[in-house]
Image (spheres, rainbow, N blue to C red):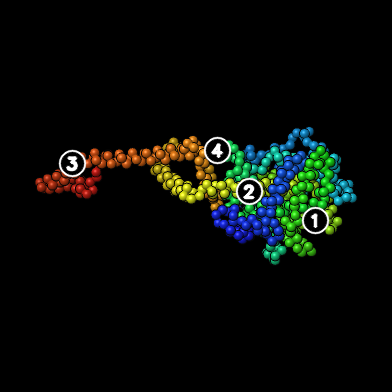
Amino acid sequence: QPNEQTAFSTKNDMTPFCKIDKDEKLGPNCDASITAINNINRKIRSDLVGLVQTDFFKYFKFDPLKKCAIWENNDGLCFSRSCAIDVVEDWDSLPAYWQPEVLGGLSNDTNSDTESLGHDNDVSFLNQLCEKHEPLLPADFDEEDINYYDVTDFTSDTAVLVDLTANPERFTGYGGQQAGQIWQSIYAENCFPADDGQEQCLAKDGFYRMMSGLHASIGTHLSNDHLNTETGKWGPDLDLFMARVGNFPDRVSNIYFNYAVVAKALWKVKPYLKHLDFCTDYDNDVKSKILNIVSQLDSKIFDENLMFENQVDSVLKDEFRKRFKNVTRIMDCVHCDRCKMWGKVQTTGYATSLKILFELDESDELSMQRVVDKLTKFELIALINTFGRLSNSIEAINNFEKLYNKRMDNNSGVASFLQNNFFKLLSKATDSIRDKINGSINGSGTLGKKDEEKQKAPKQPASPKFVDLKMPQRKIEEKDKGTTGVSSNRWKRAWETEWHNYKEAVRFVWRSYVDLPRNLWNLILVNANRLWNSFIGVTGYLSEEEEDPSVYKLDFQ
Ligand SMILES: Cc1cc2nc3c(=O)[nH]c(=O)nc-3n(C[C@H](O)[C@H](O)[C@H](O)COP(=O)(O)OP(=O)(O)OC[C@H]3O[C@@H](n4cnc5c(N)ncnc54)[C@H](O)[C@@H]3O)c2cc1C
């Protein structure tokens, strides 16, 4: 994997966010900076949010039962409710173009006749989007496969229709070894044959950045919509975000890179989208939103031509396509249905972008027919939703940056030092003392109540989480918690400990004075006894301890 930090200047070491030069280009083939993309995102955000909530774009077809082609024995399940998806069951409430007979694949009607659609105008693919009784099956791929995803995803008998807005991408609790294995396999796809030039390098780097950007975008969403198990509320978790994404400038940058890739793909289909005809009640609304969005995009945002410059030698491009398709297949192995669904949406969205970027040559009519005319409804939905996800990530990153800076301001100076070091040391010391005490109690076979409870509780496996983390400073308990809640308990406990220590010390001094006459009397008696015994010639009468007054223990109790 490319060196994670090289692309970034370290303007200011104070915050990881500042380690990214926001005005620097995102890469050699990306003539856009973070600032520029933030500006674009601000302008298109409300239209994009509105668009992904329309009836046209909010439904997606997906097969949760598709077999994992990568591993045998991949029958794991995520039992958390958050991993589940709600599928569409009330078909009557859907618009006409979503009815089973129109969707074709859902009713297993696979006899497509894509030729019947005709290619007599530039936008024949749009007819597929909504027209009743027209086959809506994937592109005709029998001549040459130019797809970067597995087209059989949408033709399966077991595919279901899901409302993406009813199944938001957020924290599900899915993780551990299985999720780690999935990510590992995804990154392993980036092992192209030995490097042989700049072109290979850019392709490989681009592949890695797309995977890492996807990973970071998912990490941003799960941190932004995270369940606080103490309050039961969903909301942003800054610590988690910093741990997964914020502390790694390259990961943040890769999200922006992906934004540039998808934005360029949308820009490229702009001439065809102008003629959009959704033939439904939503037509004008959907159309104006899409047009507003694409009108804010610029061709310079990403230069796909630098990735595969030599069009004659398509070996590298084929390799890239094959590997990307494998990534979309790896999604079938994800155990959490909701994660799998959003993984499919996003990998299909990127795959669609790549097809538009690398297979569409605007000057070639044939390529236009092969790519644009054959785009399916699901590809377009995936493309727009993936762009929506990236837009969401960027908005979340900007919010997290504000939260982070606010915390840094609050945490400045001595207060921060004490908060982050002193209390940490104190709690470490307390923990080690408690462990020792527990250890000695356990050693004697007597368990305290808490230990018994611990023994009854199922053992949590040691979490591999956060091994590679540079954790930010710990949260200060908010001042406004006042005398209630966790912080007041902590003060109460500290006061009780101090008071106890003080009482013990006073007791010790007091007993020393009280016991002094008795101990002196004992000492005189013992020595007088010893002298008397030696005077009368009795030896060995006293114990060793008593014979040597220096080892005589004073009894203060
Ligand atoms: C396809 C898919 C979709 C998922 N969707 C969700 C979801 O919707 N909600 C949810 O709660 N969980 C989801 N997960 C799980 C989530 O991505 C994490 O795997 C999980 O939260 C455990 O995180 P972790 O900290 O153990 O490390 P992981 O995120 O599993 O990462 C493993 C290792 O990869 C490296 N790494 C991490 N991020 C990056 C990056 N951006 N670039 C390069 N390297 C990186 C690190 O070295 C890390 O230790 C999904 C997982 C997958 C595979």
Looking at the figure, which quarter contains the C terminus? top left
Q: Which residue is mark 1?
A: 360
Which amino acid, by three-letter code, is at mark 2? Asn
Residue found 53% across the figure and 43% down from its top: 460
Q: Earlier in the sequence, mark 2 or mark 4?
A: 4
Name the amino acid, label 3.
Trp
Front position in the image: 284 or 28: 284
Figure label count: 4
Q: Quadrant of residue 285?
A: top right
Q: Secondary structure at mark 3?
A: helix
Using the rendered view, name the quadrant where residue 221 is placed: top right
Residue 521: image tag: 3
Observer-side mark, 1 or 3, equals 1
Name the residue at 87% across, 47% down. Answer: 117
Residue 31 location (% of width, % of height): 71, 58
What residue lies at 62% left-to-right and 42% top-to-bottom?
Answer: 225
Identify the disc placed on residue 230.
Answer: 4
- Neighbours of disc 3 within 10 Å: few (<14), some (14-19), many (20+): few
Mark 4 vs 1, N-terminal side: 4
Looking at the image, is mark 1 or mark 3 earlier in the sequence? 1
Q: Secondary structure at mark 4?
A: loop
Q: CA distance from mark 4 to mark 3?
A: 62 Å
- Are circles 3 and 2 on residues that touch, CB within 8 Å? no
Badge 1 element? loop
Q: Label 1 is placed on what type of residue?
A: Leu
Q: First in sequence: mark 1 or mark 2? A: 1
